[in-house]
Amino acid sequence: MIEIIALIILTGVIIAQYVFHYLTVKESNKEKTKLIHALISKNAEQMRDLELTEKVAPIKPMMETAPDLVEERELSDEDFEKALTREGL
């Protein structure tokens, strides 16, 4: 019984160490990024802009849609008439 409790406590300590290590590495990377931005930028506005570009999500390119234009010779007579009436011509 005591061994199980000791094992649970040991597992908790190991997990806490991993979490602490993860958080310190994450914070260290943030500081390194800020230092690099400070070295690259020429003034305070450029540094602010560099920091904001990391926070903004990149814009996804628009999906190419298939054109709804069809050549007249590919349409049957009925489809052509439907297209004319739908277009209001």
Image (tube, rainbow, N blue to C red):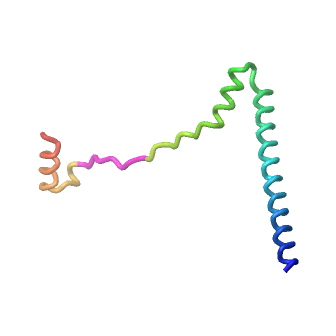
Q: Quadrant of the N terminus?
A: bottom right
Residue at the spot x=75%, y=24% of the render? 41
Front residue of this view, candidates 88 and 77: 88
Q: Position of residue 38 (x, y in %)?
A: 78, 27
Front residue of this view, candidates 44 and 16: 16
Residue at the spot x=14%, y=45% of the render? 84
Q: Position of residue 48 (x, y in %)?
A: 68, 26
Residue at the spot x=77%, y=46% of the render? 26
Total labels drawn: 0
Front residue of this view, candidates 61 and 54: 54
Q: Is residue 65 above or below residue 6?
A: above
Q: Is residue 27 left or right of residue 63?
A: right
Q: Is residue 40 above or below residue 67?
A: above
Q: Which residues are magenta?
A: 64-71
Q: Position of residue 87 (x, y in %)?
A: 17, 42
Front residue of this view, candidates 13 and 50: 13
Q: Position of residue 37 (x, y in %)?
A: 75, 30
Q: Is residue 35 left or right of residue 66?
A: right
Q: Is residue 26 above or below residue 7?
A: above
Quadrant in which residue 57 is drawn: top right
Q: Residue furthest front?
A: 1
Residue at the spot x=59%, y=37% of the render? 56
Quadrant in which residue 42 is drawn: top right
